[in-house]
Amino acid sequence: MQTNKQIKIAVGAALAAILTLTVVRGVARHGAVHAVAAEKPAPLTLIIDAGHGGEDGGAVTKSGLTESGLNLDIALRADALAAFFGVKTVLTRDSETLYYSPGATTTRQRKAEDQKRRLALINGTDNAVFLSIHQNMYTKPAPYGAQVLYAKTDGSAELGATMQELLVQTLDASNRRAAERVGDTILLMNYIDCPAVLVECGFLSNPNEEALLRSDAYRLKLAAILTAGFLQQRDELLNLQNTM
Ligand SMILES: [Zn+2]
């Protein structure tokens, strides 16, 4: 368990890291700001999606660590960090408990209902940017490394590339994975109309990454990277949304 003081130090370090990761680009971009008309663009809303939840635990390790719990923990940390930077956020869930309608009786129906609810939330939010948090799982223990999957919508590939770069630079320089376009089977990522990325933070099937993901400091670092990635692309995303 971390003490309050340790948590404060860790959060402080994460904020400092985000500032370092974002300030450089912020300064470099200053010149272009003058050309923009005085009208203030509508702000973005970052929708932070902790993958799975409720009856759907996602991937589960042999030792019983569930993906849904890790996703939620990282999502809540990213939400708190984003708030420090004045980012408007919405969480698709904030607990492990999900409420289903009485009509949804099977796990399959309940999962479908939950996906529909998240989809309506995302597509019903103006100027949204979608960040979905997941963990990877493979049949063999060797594969490792965080990977970003991006949607086909405008702005997604750039956001994905930025996040992947930060994940490699800041988390694990030996990670050779590149950001990739998301597959057709991931429903949520294919039916949304805003810029979107799905981040597979690590492989639960890799013992080293499983151990890292169990640590509070590592999950905070992940949350800081995801927040910094969004902040780095914020101006580009804002321009994009306001010209659509
Ligand atoms: Zn997942």
Image (tube, helix red, strand yellow):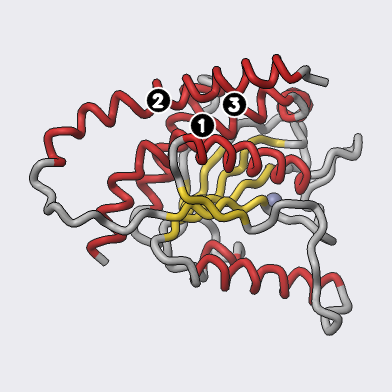
Q: Which amino acid does label 3 sit on?
A: Lys
Q: Position of residue 19 (x, y in %)?
A: 41, 24
Q: Residue 164, can we see it?
A: no
Marker disc for residue 21: 2
Q: Quadrant of residue 183?
A: bottom right
Q: Where's the C terminus, which quadrant?
A: bottom left
Q: In which quarter of the image is residue 144?
A: top right
Q: Nearer the viewer, residue 201 or 173?
A: 201
Q: Is mark 1 within 8 Å of ligand 1?
A: no
- Kindly indicate whether the residue at mark 1 contacts the one at mark 2 (C-beta within 8 angstroms): yes
User: Mark 2: which secondary structure?
Assistant: helix
Q: Where is residue 78 in the image (x, y as percent from the top left)?
A: 58, 39
User: Mark 1: which secondary structure?
Assistant: helix
- Kindly indicate whether the residue at mark 1 contacts the one at mark 3 (C-beta within 8 angstroms): yes
Q: Does the residue labelled 2 lie within 8 Å of ligand 1?
A: no
Q: Which of marks 2 and 3 is nearer the N terminus?
A: 2
Q: Quadrant of residue 107?
A: bottom right
At 72% from the left and 73% from the top, the residue drawn is 112
User: Mark 3: which secondary structure?
Assistant: helix
- Residue 105, compared with residue 97, is above or below; it is below
Q: What residue type is labelled 1?
A: Ile
Q: How far apart are marks 3 and 1 (CA)?
A: 6 Å
At 69% from the left and 44% from the top, the residue drawn is 71
Q: Distance between the residues labelled 2 and 1?
A: 9 Å
Marker disc for residue 221: 3
